[in-house]
Image (cartoon, helix red, strand yellow):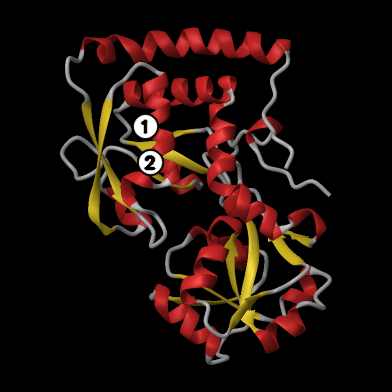
Amino acid sequence: MKREGRFGYADAMSLRRRDLLLSSAALPLAAARAAPRRLRIPHVSAKAELERSYAALLLEQALAAAGMAVTLEPTPELIPQNRALQELGRRARLDVVWTMTSVEREQQARPVRVPLFKGLFGWRLLLASAEAAARLGDVQSLQELRQFSLVQGLEWPDTAILQGNGLNVVVSPSYDAMFKQLRLGRVDAFPRSVEEVWWELERYGQGLVVVPKLCLHYPAAVYYFVAPDEGELAAAIELGLQRLRASGAFDRLFLTHHGDDLARARLGSRRVIELHNPLLPPQTPLDKPELWYRPQG
């Protein structure tokens, strides 16, 4: 698989200037700390293995690269994304949250605008029964896809994105119930990100398949978020992520955790139905291709 994120001379000079600016904001207090800072992080999905998850490992490595020693302290229980954002802050339960961005979420908390998953949460494969998959395999356009029902979670950003494209979305408050609805034929498909779909197929997908030759795509960024008044912490995270990208460590960790899923998905050989993302903030760095995954044909 082709590795992305190579820098030219101009990129390196730009990164060096940004590195210096961020360093001045992020490091003074970090250098003064004798003990690692305790950072409270959420357990936000069934797949995440708390401190061993990709996002948690990347956060730890980024802050180490920025010169800030930390100890991550995950919550023992699952926390829904919207609630996790509400619990950011010094007097609340959490210090850092990672979730898909939106205009509303960037007004609620401070984003670090580096896409952690390089946009993978916007690459969607469809879980379906074998019968529904056979019908979906013939879909050629967004208009045709609108004839099918798609299940999504209550308050998920993806729900509003799919609805914003005129798709027929059935909302469910229960993660487990979505797979049951598929098996019972109450809905036709469950769009899942490349990062999630194979893991879910193995654990919850009895009687289900991934629809072949088809995928959905919309621009989507998962960021780290901190409380609005945590400028120092946000700057340190951004500095560390930029240093990891410059050294190649970001791409190595990304491919270690997602390379097998991407190889299995074979996105470059699938028919892609492009969707727009009405929730995407204008500040999203879509003009920086090195930050995003693009499949190779």
The residue under the point 32% across, 44% down is 51
204 to 8, vertically: above or below: below
Amino acid found under the numbered disc labelled 2: Ala
Q: Which mark is drawn over residue 56?
A: 2
Position above or below: 223 against 192: above
Relative vertical location of residue 196 with respect to residue 182 in this rendering, above or below: above
Q: Say which element carries label 1.
A: helix
Q: Residues within 10 Å of mark 1 (few under 14, many from 20)?
A: many
Q: Quick one: SS at disc 2?
A: helix
- Quadrant for the N terminus, please: top right
For residue 118, what is the image quadrant? top right
The structure residue drawn at horizontal position 68% and vertical position 15%, both measured from the top left corner, is 11
Residue 113, numbered label: none
Residue 126's spot in the image, x, y percent?
64, 71
Whether tag 1 and tag 2 are in contact, CB under 8 A, the answer is yes
Pointer 1 residue: 60
Report the Cα–Cα distance between label 1 and label 2: 6 Å
Foreground of the two, 169 or 289: 289
